[in-house]
Image (cartoon, rainbow, N blue to C red):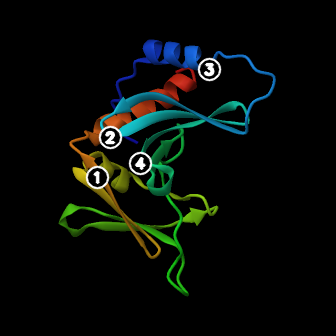
Amino acid sequence: MKSGVVFRSARLAAMMAAAFGMSGAAHAQYQQYTVKKVGAFDIIYIKEKGVFSRCAATMGSAANMLRLAWTPGKPYSISVPPAPAAPGKPLLMTFKFAGGASYSFPATTDGKRAWTPVNNDVTDRLMAAKQQIVIDLGMQHFVFPIGNTNMNNVFVEVENCSHAAMGH
């Protein structure tokens, strides 16, 4: 994880309290709320079974959505739409960066999304990404145009959201 995150807990916590203070007899199994927008990404707060699960940055529609999720104490997890593995091969998610660097990780899928936790090298490279993020999953090639989005700011806001949700 990157250190030096500037945390604006009071403002974010107040926004979350207003958004989630609604009463209701039953909680849905999965709920997400947009906290803010940073460039091409929506920063979202995710609840599962009525409790905070994680915050994430998302861009694109469900059919072509990139999601960068983080829960404090865990590595970042990246998810994309599912895709089949090459015949006889494990399902891998490969991140391709300018200059030819690439990193591959085993991916998990539930048929709706495919995801993998990533190491600090990939997180650092994603924070520095310019114009696009390129990911191969099995036999599918994804190019996510991010334009001039400052990816470091995206990661900072995901971490700010998670810290505020946990009361830090």
Residue depicted at x 42% and y 36%:
42
Q: Nearer the viewer, residue 12 or 20?
A: 20
Residues at marks 2 and 1 touching, judged by CB atoms closer than 8 Å: yes
| Residue bearing mark 1 | 145
- SS of the residue under disc 1: strand
Residue that extends furthest to the right in the rendered view of this protein: 25
Q: CA–CA distance between discs 2 and 1?
A: 8 Å
The quadrant where residue 58 appears: top left
What percent of the width, then of the height, locates residue 17? 58, 15
| Residue bearing mark 4 | 60
Residues at marks 2 and 4 touching, judged by CB atoms closer than 8 Å: no
Residues at marks 4 and 3 touching, judged by CB atoms closer than 8 Å: no
Q: CA–CA distance between discs 1 and 3?
A: 31 Å
The residue under label 1 is which amino acid type? Pro
Tell me which numbered mark, 4 or 3, is placed earlier along the sequence.
3
Residues at marks 2 and 3 touching, judged by CB atoms closer than 8 Å: no
The residue under label 4 is which amino acid type? Gly
- SS of the residue under disc 4: loop
Tell me which numbered mark, 1 or 3, is placed earlier along the sequence.
3
Q: CA–CA distance between discs 4 and 3?
A: 24 Å
The label nearer to you, 4 versus 3, is 4
Q: CA–CA distance between discs 2 and 3?
A: 24 Å
Residues at marks 1 and 3 touching, judged by CB atoms closer than 8 Å: no
Count residues near mark 3 (Cα–Cα under 10 Å), then give few for <14, some for 14-19, many for 20+.
few
| Residue bearing mark 3 | 20
